[in-house]
Image (spheres, rainbow, N blue to C red):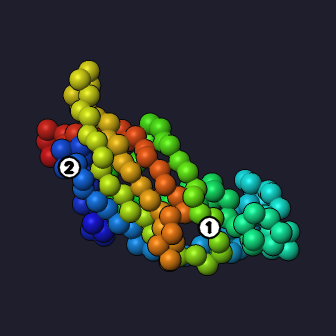
Amino acid sequence: MNMHSWEKLYLDDLSLGQEFESDPVRVNREAMLAFAREYDPQPFHLSAEEAESSLFGGLAASGWNTAALTMKMLVASVPLANGIIGLGIELSWPTPTYPDNVLRLFSTVKAIDPSASKPDRGVVTLFMETLNQNDKVVQRATGKLLVFRRPAED
C-alpha cells in the first residue's frame, strides 16, 4: 500500500499481514560519501580505489546509511498518526548497497499487541525488507513500534 494521501493510521487501523510499499529512492554517491565521512569513516565507504580490494569489491554504503535511507522510506510509506516510535529493532545487511542503487522498502505487520496496562496504545511488530533494483535484499529488519489507538474524539 503506497500511502501518498497521508491517511493517518492508528493501532485500530492496522491488521495482521497488512503490507506497505515505499516509493523508490536512489542512493546518491556524494550523499553516501558525506554520510561515511561523518558517521562511518572506513576505507571501503570512502575510497573507490581502496574499496576495490575489499570484501565489497567496490565503494559500498555504510549499513547505517542504508538504515537511514530505509527510515526515510518507512516514514513516507507507513503513515502512523503519532509517527514512527521505535521500541527496538533486529537488523541485518545481507547484500551491500552501492552508489546509484535504487532502493524500495516493503513492510508487513507481523503482530499487534494492545497494551493491557495502557489501553491507549500497543506494540506493532513490523517486518521490513529493503531491496535494490535487482530485487536483492540489502537490509532486513524486524522492528517493534509503539502505536497509539485512535483518540475518542476522532
| Residue most extreme to the right | 50
User: Which percent across, then down, holds residue 64?
Assistant: 63, 54
**Which residue is pictured at 26% across the width and 21% down the height?**
117
Q: Mark 2 points at which residue?
A: 15
Q: Depth check: give the residue in front, 153 or 29.
A: 29
Q: Is residue 57 visible?
A: yes
Mark 1 vs 2, N-terminal side: 2
Q: Name the residue under label 1.
A: 97
**Which residue is pictured at 80% across the width and 57% down the height?**
42
Image position of 152 with respect to 135: above or below = above
**Which residue is pictured at 21% across the width and 28% down the height?**
119
The answer to which image quadrant residue 152 occupies is: top left
Q: Depth check: give the residue in front, 41 or 4.
A: 41
Identity of the amino acid at label 2?
Answer: Ser
Q: Helix, strand or loop at disc 2?
A: loop
User: Which percent across, then down, holds residue 95?
Assistant: 59, 63
Identity of the amino acid at label 1?
Answer: Thr
User: Which percent across, then down, holds residue 107?
Assistant: 36, 57
The answer to which image quadrant residue 61 occupies is: bottom right
Q: Which mark is residue 65?
A: none
Q: Depth check: give the residue in front, 121 or 96.
A: 96
Q: Helix, strand or loop at disc 1?
A: loop
